[in-house]
Image (cartoon, rainbow, N blue to C red):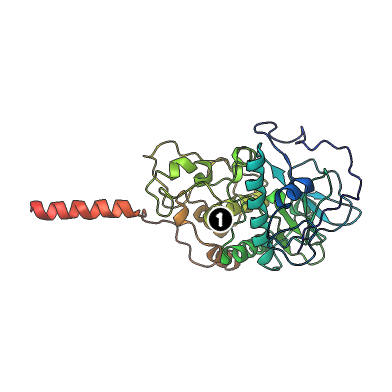
Amino acid sequence: MHFVAHPDIAPTNRLLTPSTSDMVVALEPSYYLTAGDVENVFKNSRDFSITETDTSYHELFVQAVDVPDVEAFEPTFSDMTGLQYHPIRMYSSTPTGRTIEINRILDRLHWYHNLGAHANILRIDSLYARENQPLALVSRRRLVSLRSYIEANPKANRRQICIDLARGVDFLHSNGFAHGRIRLSNMFIDPETGISVLGMPSERSIPNGITLREYSRWASPELANSDTFGKMPVDHYRDAYRGEYRPDSDIYALACTIIEIYTGQTPGMYRINTLRDSLSGSGFMPGTVNLAAMPHDVVQTVMLMMNLDPGRRPNSGLVVQHLVNPKLVHVTKFQPALAKYQARRFMRSMSSRSSQS
């Protein structure tokens, strides 16, 4: 896909700032990414030109269609065309910072687009832009909000919905891509086929403070406590974790979303305050949630998915298997995992005891 700006379309005089109806306002400077921002970044780029029509590195394409008012952070729909628009929010306040941020955003979107089509993910069909308007991701699939669908259809097959979403997550994870925006408000369903679909992923690899505050109920412990996790004896996180989205955090967020689908409630964020806090071996359910409406096997699966130790959560393939086959044996308790330095300390202690004896 290519990126083409459309300055010939007269812009509207709408203020590109967060709506006052948003959950959190003005915690950090922010605005919506516009076509002009992208043009300024790539004006002199060797591998990208705003006027090129051949394949470029970012392979972005823009459709000349009208853009509805975009004031919320969640997906906005056009009733006239059926297209879905997802504005991209910016946070950097300096020209250099904006350049770096835009490059990272476009690289991630390029990666996501190149994964290809899948029945349970929302594909980026195009990027739309015009002067002084938000640069918006566009999808041509005619879908409806999954939350609205469930509210209108109390007898909807919730298990199948969860299976569909888990399959979408599994497709992404199988390609090494962490979604980062898994929550019921970003899930959709095709009313004709009944297939549930993951919405657009986060265009960033690391959530910022606003995102963590607004969507704390879906944030895994390692996302909410990234500094602490970087110091804890947890394999693959100690000294190398920067708070980025990983498949582990997607699994946790998917568990929260499954709870939403069945109960209409979401658990709260769990904070690890001290290094002495042990990571649960069996899973952890933060907050008070009524699980009576959930099948027992689904509760077991969700508990495993919300394990405080990210390395102890089942991968997306196992989640699909557990949801598809309710009779599949669930392992409900694990022995604590030893991180590398713990294992070395244990071996040193054993060596010391041997020498003393």
Residue at image position (14%, 52%) is 353
Residue 82 position (above or below residue 34): below
- When asked about the image quadrant of residue 167, the answer is bottom right
Left or right relative to 140: residue 342:
left
Which residue is at 68% across, 46% downward? 264
Q: Position of residue 220 (x, y in %)?
A: 54, 47
Q: Is residue 12 left or right of residue 174?
A: right
Viewer can see residue 207: yes
Quarter assignment of residue 22: top right
Instruction: Classify 10 Å Cα crowding around label 1: few (below 14), some (14-19), many (20 and above).
Output: many
Left/right of residue 223 with respect to residue 31 in the rendered view: left
Q: Nearer the viewer, residue 40 or 17?
A: 40
Residue bearing the label numbered 1: 251
Q: Which one is in front, 290 or 281?
A: 281
For label 1, the SS is helix
* Residue toward you, 157 or 238: 238
